Image (cartoon, grey):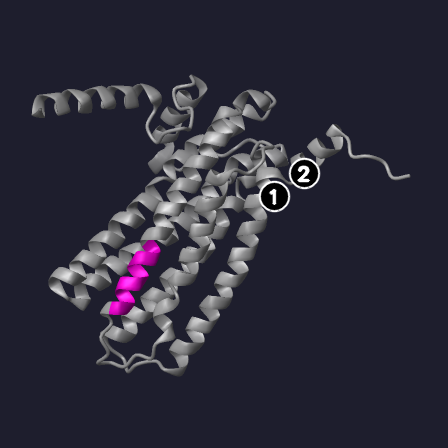
Amino acid sequence: MTNKLTLSDIRERQDSVGLSGHYLSLSATVVSLGLAAAAAAAANLIAHIPSPGWNCFILLLLLVGGVLGVVVGYAGPMVGAFALPPAIPVMQDLIPPLLLGVSEFLVFGPFLSTFTARSDIGPALKLWFIATGIYGMSAFAIILRARYLLAKSRDGYDDKVLPTLNRYLAYMTLTFTGPAMLVILTVLGELSWLIFGSKLVVTIFLVLIVADYAFGFGFHNVQARPWKALLAGEEEPEAPRFVRKRVATIQRRVQLGELDGRYFLPARRLKRLRSRLTAQARDLV
């Protein structure tokens, strides 16, 4: 006679998979398919590469940006998803990662066409900017959701882990800058193309987007420091100088419960902002 599944069995299974398993398995699947799409795009570009010029340079930037997007999207969950509290994934945990995965494929859509030095690159830029914008908004939502889950469960972590968690939450708050800048740059890049139609101007925005991706990838290594030090039983190195003061400020807010993770701004500052906006709305009426 088979043994019946008990509540403890169900909880053990849920704890072993849960949110961390969801994010990590989905990220591993997406990066595999994303890199396959990148390889296909690179092969098509090599086979039909236009003569040296603006189109060739822009297409190379689109390819590099797409690959970096896949890598950065994979690196994020790898440095912190394992620390998520056990929970059953809900819609907020499912939709943003799926949209992120879709956007990682869309960025390689422009390479389905054959380009020449005189080809109109406008449609390719439009598709790439739309996909990158979706990527940025999805990444922002994923970070916000993960920070909320970690912050609201701080009481469930051991005293030895809590300082590391607080530091990681501070780093996580700073990573909002990456996807936010990505969305701003994609909007400005597309607008610059629609208004000016200049390949030089749009190339500047593409370079800035690639730099944003590269900086985000490098910052993931910084973000992983608290967990690395904790697991190795070593003292965590100080935060980089350019973010040291900001990290310390955010960490204090986390410890005081002012930054519970539900919003981008601390609850106290958000309340003041709401009051100010409400007062301005009344004055307009």
State whether residue 21 is above or below residue 265.
Answer: below
Q: Residue at x 30, y 63 (%)?
A: 127
- Point out which mark residue 21 bears: 1
Give, as a three-letter code, the residue at label 1.
Answer: Gly
The stretch in magenta equals 123-132
Q: Nearer the viewer, residue 190 or 42?
A: 190
The answer to whether 257 appears left or right of 24 in the picture is left
Q: Answer yes or no: do the residues labelled 1 and 2 have beta carbons within 8 Å?
A: yes
Magenta segment includes 124: yes
Q: Residue furthest left?
A: 284
Name the residue nearer the viewer: 273 or 179: 273
Given the image, on which type of amino acid does mark 2 rest? Ser
Question: Which residue is farthest top?
Answer: 256
User: For mark 2, what is the residue?
Assistant: 16
The crowding category of the residue bearing disc 2, from other C-alpha atoms within 10 Å (few below 14, some 14 to 19, many at least 20), is few
> Can you give x and y, in whole percent of width and height, for residue 26 in the image?
55, 50
| Marked residue nearer the N-terminal end (1 or 2) | 2
Identify which residue is drawn at 53% across, 39% down. Answer: 80
Left or right of 21 on screen, residue 184: left
Question: Relative to 3, is 154 on the left or the right?
Answer: left
Q: Quadrant of residue 177?
A: top left
